[in-house]
Amino acid sequence: MTMTGEPPPDATIGAVSPTGAMRPMALPTPRGPVSAKLIALLTGPEHSPVGELAVAATEALAISDDLLVDDDLQLALFLMYELHYGGLEGVPDTWEWDPRLLAVRVPIEREFEDALRHAVPQPFATRDVPEALFALVGADDGPSLSAFVEHEATAVQVREVLVCRTIYTLKEADPHSWAIPRLHARAKSALVEIQADEYGGGRPERLHATIFADALRGAGLDDRYGAYADHVPVTVYTSMNLMSLFGLHRRLRGAIVGHLAAYEMTSSIPCRAYASGLRRLGFGDDVTDYFDEHVEADAVHEQLAARDLAGALAEDEPAVARDILFGAAACLAIDGRLWGGLRERFERGESALRKPLP
Amino acid sequence: MSAEASARPVSITACPDGPLLVRGDLALFDEDGEPLQANRRTFALCRCGASAIRPFCDGSHKLVGFRTTPPPRTPAVTFDEP
Protein backbone atom coordinates (compact mmCIF):
# COMPACT_ATOMS: atom_id res chain seq x y z
CA MET A 1 0.00 0.00 0.00
CA THR A 2 1.25 3.47 -0.78
CA MET A 3 0.00 6.71 0.68
CA THR A 4 -0.32 8.34 -2.72
CA GLY A 5 -3.23 6.11 -3.69
CA GLU A 6 -1.28 4.64 -6.57
CA PRO A 7 -0.32 0.98 -6.61
CA PRO A 8 3.31 0.31 -5.71
CA PRO A 9 5.57 -0.49 -8.68
CA ASP A 10 5.57 -4.15 -7.76
CA ALA A 11 2.80 -5.12 -5.38
CA THR A 12 3.91 -8.76 -5.32
CA ILE A 13 6.97 -8.09 -3.15
CA GLY A 14 4.90 -7.04 -0.16
CA ALA A 15 5.01 -10.37 1.71
CA VAL A 16 6.15 -9.98 5.32
CA SER A 17 9.53 -11.58 5.86
CA PRO A 18 9.82 -13.70 9.00
CA THR A 19 13.16 -12.03 9.76
CA GLY A 20 11.97 -8.46 9.46
CA ALA A 21 14.58 -7.89 6.79
CA MET A 22 12.03 -6.81 4.21
CA ARG A 23 13.87 -4.35 2.03
CA PRO A 24 13.76 -2.21 0.00
CA MET A 25 11.35 0.06 1.85
CA ALA A 26 8.16 1.40 0.31
CA LEU A 27 8.30 5.09 -0.53
CA PRO A 28 6.70 7.34 2.09
CA THR A 29 4.35 10.29 1.60
CA PRO A 30 6.31 13.48 0.88
CA ARG A 31 6.53 16.10 3.63
CA GLY A 32 7.17 19.10 1.40
CA PRO A 33 8.44 20.17 -2.03
CA VAL A 34 11.94 18.64 -1.77
CA SER A 35 10.82 15.15 -0.73
CA ALA A 36 7.96 15.36 -3.27
CA LYS A 37 10.30 16.23 -6.15
CA LEU A 38 12.83 13.65 -4.99
CA ILE A 39 10.25 10.85 -4.94
CA ALA A 40 8.90 11.95 -8.33
CA LEU A 41 12.42 11.92 -9.76
CA LEU A 42 13.39 8.52 -8.31
CA THR A 43 10.18 6.86 -9.53
CA GLY A 44 10.09 8.64 -12.89
CA PRO A 45 11.84 7.73 -16.14
CA GLU A 46 15.51 6.88 -15.65
CA HIS A 47 18.01 9.66 -16.41
CA SER A 48 15.38 12.37 -15.85
CA PRO A 49 16.91 15.82 -15.21
CA VAL A 50 17.44 16.72 -11.54
CA GLY A 51 17.08 20.48 -12.10
CA GLU A 52 13.69 20.88 -10.42
CA LEU A 53 14.83 18.94 -7.35
CA ALA A 54 18.03 20.99 -7.11
CA VAL A 55 16.04 24.24 -7.26
CA ALA A 56 13.57 23.01 -4.62
CA ALA A 57 16.42 21.96 -2.32
CA THR A 58 18.21 25.30 -2.71
CA GLU A 59 15.01 27.19 -1.94
CA ALA A 60 14.15 24.97 1.02
CA LEU A 61 17.62 25.37 2.52
CA ALA A 62 17.36 29.15 2.13
CA ILE A 63 14.07 29.42 4.01
CA SER A 64 14.52 26.61 6.57
CA ASP A 65 14.30 27.95 10.14
CA ASP A 66 16.02 24.96 11.70
CA LEU A 67 17.31 22.14 9.54
CA LEU A 68 17.43 19.84 12.58
CA VAL A 69 13.61 19.77 12.70
CA ASP A 70 12.83 20.36 9.01
CA ASP A 71 10.46 17.54 8.05
CA ASP A 72 10.86 17.94 4.31
CA LEU A 73 14.67 18.22 4.14
CA GLN A 74 15.33 15.53 6.75
CA LEU A 75 13.00 13.08 4.98
CA ALA A 76 14.63 13.88 1.61
CA LEU A 77 18.10 13.34 3.09
CA PHE A 78 16.95 10.11 4.72
CA LEU A 79 15.65 8.78 1.38
CA MET A 80 18.89 9.68 -0.40
CA TYR A 81 20.87 7.89 2.30
CA GLU A 82 18.53 4.87 2.17
CA LEU A 83 19.82 4.21 -1.35
CA HIS A 84 23.10 3.20 0.39
CA TYR A 85 21.33 0.81 2.81
CA GLY A 86 18.38 -1.35 1.78
CA GLY A 87 17.19 0.78 -1.12
CA LEU A 88 13.78 2.15 -2.05
CA GLU A 89 11.00 0.11 -3.59
CA GLY A 90 10.64 0.77 -7.32
CA VAL A 91 13.77 2.95 -7.45
CA PRO A 92 16.65 1.83 -9.72
CA ASP A 93 19.80 1.02 -7.73
CA THR A 94 21.85 3.17 -10.11
CA TRP A 95 20.58 6.31 -8.32
CA GLU A 96 22.85 5.44 -5.37
CA TRP A 97 25.97 6.79 -7.09
CA ASP A 98 24.35 9.14 -9.61
CA PRO A 99 26.60 12.20 -9.38
CA ARG A 100 23.69 14.54 -10.12
CA LEU A 101 21.78 13.27 -7.10
CA LEU A 102 24.91 13.41 -4.94
CA ALA A 103 25.33 17.05 -6.03
CA VAL A 104 21.86 17.78 -4.62
CA ARG A 105 22.74 15.97 -1.38
CA VAL A 106 26.03 17.78 -0.73
CA PRO A 107 24.60 21.21 0.18
CA ILE A 108 21.95 19.61 2.42
CA GLU A 109 24.66 17.65 4.21
CA ARG A 110 26.86 20.75 4.52
CA GLU A 111 24.03 22.78 6.10
CA PHE A 112 23.11 19.80 8.31
CA GLU A 113 26.67 19.53 9.61
CA ASP A 114 26.83 23.33 10.12
CA ALA A 115 23.57 23.22 12.10
CA LEU A 116 24.95 20.38 14.25
CA ARG A 117 28.26 22.13 14.89
CA HIS A 118 26.28 25.23 15.88
CA ALA A 119 23.77 23.43 18.13
CA VAL A 120 26.17 21.02 19.87
CA PRO A 121 28.94 22.43 22.09
CA GLN A 122 32.35 20.98 21.14
CA PRO A 123 33.84 19.08 24.10
CA PHE A 124 37.57 18.72 24.73
CA ALA A 125 39.30 16.02 26.79
CA THR A 126 41.46 17.45 29.54
CA ARG A 127 43.27 14.13 30.02
CA ASP A 128 42.17 11.27 27.75
CA VAL A 129 39.23 10.53 25.46
CA PRO A 130 37.72 7.51 27.32
CA GLU A 131 37.61 9.45 30.59
CA ALA A 132 36.07 12.42 28.77
CA LEU A 133 33.44 10.17 27.18
CA PHE A 134 32.41 8.72 30.55
CA ALA A 135 32.22 12.25 31.97
CA LEU A 136 30.15 13.53 29.02
CA VAL A 137 27.68 10.67 29.31
CA GLY A 138 27.57 10.96 33.10
CA ALA A 139 26.72 14.67 32.87
CA ASP A 140 23.91 14.12 30.39
CA ASP A 141 20.78 14.89 32.38
CA GLY A 142 18.05 15.28 29.77
CA PRO A 143 14.54 14.09 30.62
CA SER A 144 14.58 10.30 30.62
CA LEU A 145 12.07 8.50 28.44
CA SER A 146 13.17 5.13 29.84
CA ALA A 147 12.20 6.10 33.40
CA PHE A 148 8.83 7.27 32.08
CA VAL A 149 8.35 3.96 30.27
CA GLU A 150 9.37 2.02 33.36
CA HIS A 151 6.85 3.64 35.70
CA GLU A 152 4.19 5.64 33.88
CA ALA A 153 3.74 4.93 30.18
CA THR A 154 0.61 3.29 28.82
CA ALA A 155 0.69 0.37 26.39
CA VAL A 156 -0.32 2.78 23.60
CA GLN A 157 2.62 5.07 24.42
CA VAL A 158 5.06 2.16 24.56
CA ARG A 159 3.94 1.00 21.12
CA GLU A 160 4.59 4.53 19.86
CA VAL A 161 8.09 4.38 21.33
CA LEU A 162 8.70 1.08 19.51
CA VAL A 163 7.39 2.65 16.28
CA CYS A 164 9.80 5.57 16.69
CA ARG A 165 12.69 3.10 17.06
CA THR A 166 11.91 1.23 13.83
CA ILE A 167 13.78 3.55 11.46
CA TYR A 168 17.12 2.93 13.17
CA THR A 169 16.72 -0.32 15.07
CA LEU A 170 15.56 -2.42 12.10
CA LYS A 171 19.01 -1.66 10.68
CA GLU A 172 20.75 -1.46 14.04
CA ALA A 173 24.54 -1.11 13.85
CA ASP A 174 24.59 -0.60 10.07
CA PRO A 175 25.59 3.09 10.00
CA HIS A 176 28.55 2.41 12.29
CA SER A 177 29.72 -0.47 10.09
CA TRP A 178 30.60 2.05 7.35
CA ALA A 179 33.58 2.98 9.55
CA ILE A 180 35.19 -0.48 9.54
CA PRO A 181 37.42 -0.03 6.44
CA ARG A 182 38.28 3.51 7.54
CA LEU A 183 39.85 2.38 10.80
CA HIS A 184 43.03 0.43 11.43
CA ALA A 185 44.67 -1.87 13.94
CA ARG A 186 43.23 -1.70 17.48
CA ALA A 187 40.28 0.57 16.65
CA LYS A 188 39.21 -1.62 13.71
CA SER A 189 39.50 -4.76 15.82
CA ALA A 190 37.39 -3.22 18.59
CA LEU A 191 34.71 -2.00 16.19
CA VAL A 192 34.44 -5.44 14.58
CA GLU A 193 34.29 -7.06 18.03
CA ILE A 194 31.28 -4.85 18.87
CA GLN A 195 29.60 -5.20 15.48
CA ALA A 196 30.00 -9.00 15.44
CA ASP A 197 27.96 -9.07 18.65
CA GLU A 198 25.40 -6.60 17.21
CA TYR A 199 25.03 -8.92 14.23
CA GLY A 200 24.38 -11.98 16.40
CA GLY A 201 27.87 -13.49 16.67
CA GLY A 202 27.21 -15.89 13.79
CA ARG A 203 23.61 -16.65 14.83
CA PRO A 204 21.25 -14.92 12.37
CA GLU A 205 18.33 -15.21 14.79
CA ARG A 206 20.33 -13.14 17.30
CA LEU A 207 20.97 -10.21 14.97
CA HIS A 208 19.87 -7.27 17.09
CA ALA A 209 17.75 -5.95 14.22
CA THR A 210 16.07 -9.37 14.02
CA ILE A 211 15.44 -9.52 17.77
CA PHE A 212 13.86 -6.08 17.45
CA ALA A 213 11.68 -7.27 14.54
CA ASP A 214 10.54 -10.12 16.81
CA ALA A 215 9.69 -7.55 19.49
CA LEU A 216 7.66 -5.49 17.00
CA ARG A 217 5.63 -8.51 15.94
CA GLY A 218 5.17 -9.49 19.58
CA ALA A 219 3.73 -6.04 20.23
CA GLY A 220 1.38 -6.38 17.27
CA LEU A 221 3.38 -4.01 15.06
CA ASP A 222 4.58 -4.25 11.45
CA ASP A 223 8.27 -5.21 11.16
CA ARG A 224 8.75 -4.27 7.52
CA TYR A 225 11.40 -1.59 7.12
CA GLY A 226 9.75 1.81 6.73
CA ALA A 227 6.26 0.56 7.63
CA TYR A 228 5.87 3.61 9.87
CA ALA A 229 7.76 6.09 7.70
CA ASP A 230 4.72 8.37 7.59
CA HIS A 231 4.03 8.12 11.32
CA VAL A 232 7.34 9.03 12.92
CA PRO A 233 8.25 12.62 13.83
CA VAL A 234 11.08 14.43 12.07
CA THR A 235 13.40 13.90 15.05
CA VAL A 236 13.52 10.20 14.17
CA TYR A 237 14.92 11.07 10.73
CA THR A 238 17.34 13.63 12.16
CA SER A 239 18.70 10.98 14.52
CA MET A 240 19.09 8.46 11.68
CA ASN A 241 20.60 11.03 9.30
CA LEU A 242 23.12 12.02 11.96
CA MET A 243 24.47 8.46 11.93
CA SER A 244 24.47 8.22 8.13
CA LEU A 245 26.23 11.58 7.75
CA PHE A 246 28.95 10.53 10.20
CA GLY A 247 29.16 6.97 8.87
CA LEU A 248 29.28 7.68 5.15
CA HIS A 249 32.04 10.30 5.27
CA ARG A 250 35.55 9.02 5.99
CA ARG A 251 36.39 12.57 7.05
CA LEU A 252 33.94 12.14 9.95
CA ARG A 253 35.21 8.71 11.12
CA GLY A 254 36.00 10.18 14.52
CA ALA A 255 32.41 11.40 14.86
CA ILE A 256 30.82 8.03 14.01
CA VAL A 257 33.12 6.33 16.52
CA GLY A 258 32.18 8.88 19.18
CA HIS A 259 28.53 8.44 18.27
CA LEU A 260 28.74 4.69 18.76
CA ALA A 261 30.53 5.11 22.09
CA ALA A 262 27.89 7.51 23.43
CA TYR A 263 25.09 5.29 22.11
CA GLU A 264 26.48 2.16 23.78
CA MET A 265 27.30 4.04 26.99
CA THR A 266 23.69 5.23 27.41
CA SER A 267 21.99 1.94 26.63
CA SER A 268 22.31 -0.68 29.40
CA ILE A 269 20.52 1.11 32.22
CA PRO A 270 17.73 2.57 30.02
CA CYS A 271 17.18 -0.84 28.41
CA ARG A 272 16.68 -2.37 31.85
CA ALA A 273 14.05 0.30 32.53
CA TYR A 274 12.35 -0.34 29.16
CA ALA A 275 12.23 -4.09 29.85
CA SER A 276 10.80 -3.44 33.31
CA GLY A 277 8.13 -1.10 31.90
CA LEU A 278 7.17 -3.60 29.20
CA ARG A 279 6.77 -6.33 31.83
CA ARG A 280 4.67 -3.98 34.01
CA LEU A 281 2.33 -3.54 31.03
CA GLY A 282 2.11 -7.28 30.41
CA PHE A 283 4.15 -7.54 27.21
CA GLY A 284 5.69 -10.98 26.70
CA ASP A 285 9.25 -12.24 26.59
CA ASP A 286 9.22 -11.90 22.81
CA VAL A 287 8.97 -8.13 23.30
CA THR A 288 11.28 -7.76 26.32
CA ASP A 289 14.02 -10.01 24.86
CA TYR A 290 15.43 -7.16 22.75
CA PHE A 291 15.82 -4.92 25.80
CA ASP A 292 17.09 -7.69 28.10
CA GLU A 293 19.71 -8.57 25.49
CA HIS A 294 20.91 -4.95 25.42
CA VAL A 295 21.28 -4.69 29.19
CA GLU A 296 24.01 -7.31 29.05
CA ALA A 297 25.41 -6.63 25.57
CA ASP A 298 25.80 -2.90 25.97
CA ALA A 299 27.46 -3.20 29.38
CA VAL A 300 30.22 -4.96 27.39
CA HIS A 301 30.02 -2.69 24.35
CA GLU A 302 30.35 0.51 26.36
CA GLN A 303 33.71 -0.60 27.68
CA LEU A 304 34.90 -1.76 24.27
CA ALA A 305 33.61 1.38 22.54
CA ALA A 306 34.98 3.91 25.02
CA ARG A 307 38.37 2.33 25.60
CA ASP A 308 39.41 -0.10 22.84
CA LEU A 309 37.64 1.76 20.01
CA ALA A 310 37.49 5.50 20.81
CA GLY A 311 40.50 5.49 23.12
CA ALA A 312 42.70 3.63 20.66
CA LEU A 313 41.57 5.77 17.73
CA ALA A 314 42.34 8.96 19.65
CA GLU A 315 45.83 7.66 20.44
CA ASP A 316 46.51 6.43 16.92
CA GLU A 317 44.97 9.45 15.16
CA PRO A 318 45.09 12.41 17.56
CA ALA A 319 43.70 14.67 14.82
CA VAL A 320 40.28 13.03 15.05
CA ALA A 321 40.02 13.11 18.87
CA ARG A 322 38.05 16.35 18.64
CA ASP A 323 35.49 14.74 16.33
CA ILE A 324 35.17 11.66 18.55
CA LEU A 325 33.91 13.91 21.33
CA PHE A 326 31.81 15.95 18.91
CA GLY A 327 30.15 12.76 17.63
CA ALA A 328 29.42 11.66 21.20
CA ALA A 329 28.00 15.06 22.15
CA ALA A 330 25.89 15.14 18.96
CA CYS A 331 24.48 11.68 19.76
CA LEU A 332 23.52 12.78 23.27
CA ALA A 333 22.00 16.06 22.04
CA ILE A 334 20.04 14.76 19.03
CA ASP A 335 18.82 11.56 20.66
CA GLY A 336 18.07 13.55 23.81
CA ARG A 337 15.81 15.81 21.76
CA LEU A 338 14.16 12.82 20.10
CA TRP A 339 13.39 10.78 23.22
CA GLY A 340 12.94 13.76 25.52
CA GLY A 341 10.50 15.15 22.94
CA LEU A 342 8.45 11.95 23.08
CA ARG A 343 8.27 12.16 26.85
CA GLU A 344 7.13 15.79 26.71
CA ARG A 345 4.35 14.90 24.30
CA PHE A 346 3.25 11.95 26.43
CA GLU A 347 3.21 14.14 29.54
CA ARG A 348 0.97 16.61 27.70
CA GLY A 349 -1.35 13.73 26.84
CA GLU A 350 -0.42 13.87 23.14
CA SER A 351 0.61 11.20 20.69
CA ALA A 352 4.26 11.14 19.60
CA LEU A 353 3.24 10.25 16.08
CA ARG A 354 2.14 12.39 13.13
CA LYS A 355 -0.84 10.13 12.43
CA PRO A 356 -2.58 7.38 14.41
CA LEU A 357 -1.42 3.79 14.14
CA PRO A 358 -3.68 1.53 12.03
CA MET B 1 40.26 -29.98 15.05
CA SER B 2 40.47 -30.90 18.73
CA ALA B 3 38.83 -28.75 21.38
CA GLU B 4 42.27 -28.01 22.76
CA ALA B 5 43.55 -26.72 19.47
CA SER B 6 40.52 -24.52 18.89
CA ALA B 7 40.37 -23.02 22.39
CA ARG B 8 40.90 -19.28 22.54
CA PRO B 9 43.34 -18.11 25.22
CA VAL B 10 41.67 -16.51 28.22
CA SER B 11 42.27 -12.89 29.11
CA ILE B 12 40.63 -10.82 31.83
CA THR B 13 40.83 -7.04 31.62
CA ALA B 14 39.91 -4.82 34.57
CA CYS B 15 38.05 -1.71 33.38
CA PRO B 16 38.63 1.39 35.51
CA ASP B 17 35.53 2.03 37.67
CA GLY B 18 33.81 -0.81 35.81
CA PRO B 19 33.57 -4.56 35.18
CA LEU B 20 36.04 -7.30 34.32
CA LEU B 21 36.08 -7.96 30.57
CA VAL B 22 36.58 -11.65 29.81
CA ARG B 23 37.72 -13.05 26.48
CA GLY B 24 38.54 -16.63 25.56
CA ASP B 25 37.15 -20.08 26.18
CA LEU B 26 36.56 -20.88 29.82
CA ALA B 27 33.96 -22.61 31.96
CA LEU B 28 31.73 -20.46 34.14
CA PHE B 29 29.68 -21.80 37.10
CA ASP B 30 27.05 -20.16 39.29
CA GLU B 31 26.83 -20.30 43.10
CA ASP B 32 25.24 -23.76 42.97
CA GLY B 33 27.92 -25.11 40.70
CA GLU B 34 25.64 -25.08 37.69
CA PRO B 35 27.35 -24.22 34.42
CA LEU B 36 26.59 -20.73 33.12
CA GLN B 37 26.47 -19.94 29.43
CA ALA B 38 27.84 -16.55 28.39
CA ASN B 39 25.67 -15.09 25.65
CA ARG B 40 28.57 -13.52 23.74
CA ARG B 41 32.21 -14.09 22.90
CA THR B 42 33.40 -11.15 25.01
CA PHE B 43 31.52 -10.70 28.25
CA ALA B 44 31.70 -8.47 31.32
CA LEU B 45 31.66 -9.75 34.90
CA CYS B 46 30.22 -7.51 37.63
CA ARG B 47 32.86 -6.07 39.96
CA CYS B 48 30.72 -3.64 41.98
CA GLY B 49 28.16 -6.14 43.29
CA ALA B 50 25.17 -4.06 42.20
CA SER B 51 24.31 -5.82 38.93
CA ALA B 52 20.85 -7.34 38.64
CA ILE B 53 22.17 -9.99 36.24
CA ARG B 54 25.20 -11.21 38.23
CA PRO B 55 27.70 -12.54 37.55
CA PHE B 56 27.37 -10.39 34.41
CA CYS B 57 27.61 -6.60 34.37
CA ASP B 58 24.51 -4.50 33.64
CA GLY B 59 26.08 -1.07 33.94
CA SER B 60 24.88 -0.56 37.53
CA HIS B 61 28.40 0.44 38.67
CA LYS B 62 27.65 3.91 37.27
CA LEU B 63 24.48 4.22 39.36
CA VAL B 64 26.20 3.25 42.61
CA GLY B 65 29.31 5.37 42.01
CA PHE B 66 31.68 2.37 42.04
CA ARG B 67 35.29 3.54 41.77
CA THR B 68 38.54 1.63 41.42
CA THR B 69 40.63 4.79 41.37
CA PRO B 70 40.30 8.01 43.39
CA PRO B 71 38.06 10.53 41.62
CA PRO B 72 40.08 13.11 39.67
CA ARG B 73 40.27 16.60 41.16
CA THR B 74 39.72 18.39 37.86
CA PRO B 75 37.01 17.91 35.21
CA ALA B 76 37.64 15.30 32.50
CA VAL B 77 35.99 17.40 29.82
CA THR B 78 35.72 21.12 29.02
CA PHE B 79 33.83 22.99 26.34
CA ASP B 80 36.55 25.57 25.66
CA GLU B 81 39.54 25.26 23.37
CA PRO B 82 42.36 23.92 25.58
Image (cartoon, coloured by chain):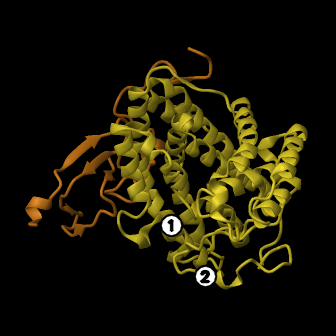
Chain colours: A yellow, B orange
The residue carrying pointer 2 sits among few (fewer than 14), some (14 to 19) or many (20 or more) residues within 10 Å by Cα, namely few
Amino acid tagged 2: Val
Question: Residue B44 location, x and y as percent?
Answer: 33, 51
Q: Secondary structure at mark 2?
A: loop
Question: Residue A196 location, x and y as percent?
Answer: 38, 57
Outermost residue toward the front in this view:
A47
Q: Which residue is mark 2?
A: A16
Question: Residue A295 location, x and y as percent?
Answer: 46, 57
Residue B19, quarter of the rendered image: top left
The chain letter for the residue carrying disc 2 is A
Give the total of numbered labels.
2
Q: Residue at x 63, y 27 (%)?
A: A122
Locate the C terminus of chain B and report the quarter of the image it occupies. Answer: top right
Q: CA distance from mark 1 to mark 2?
A: 20 Å
Q: Residue at x 10, y 67 (%)?
A: B1
- Residue A90 lies, with reference to residue A145, above or below; the image says below
Closer to us: B82 or A282: B82
Res. A343 in view: no
The residue carrying pointer 1 sits among few (fewer than 14), some (14 to 19) or many (20 or more) residues within 10 Å by Cα, namely many
Outermost residue toward the top in this view:
B82
Q: Secondary structure at mark 1?
A: helix
Res. A269 in view: yes
Q: Is residue A306 left or right of residue A139?
A: left
Question: Residue A170 location, x and y as percent?
Answer: 58, 65
Amino acid tagged 1: Tyr
Closer to us: A50 or A323: A50
Closer to us: A84 or A199: A84
- Residue A297 lies, with reference to residue A260, above or below; the image says below
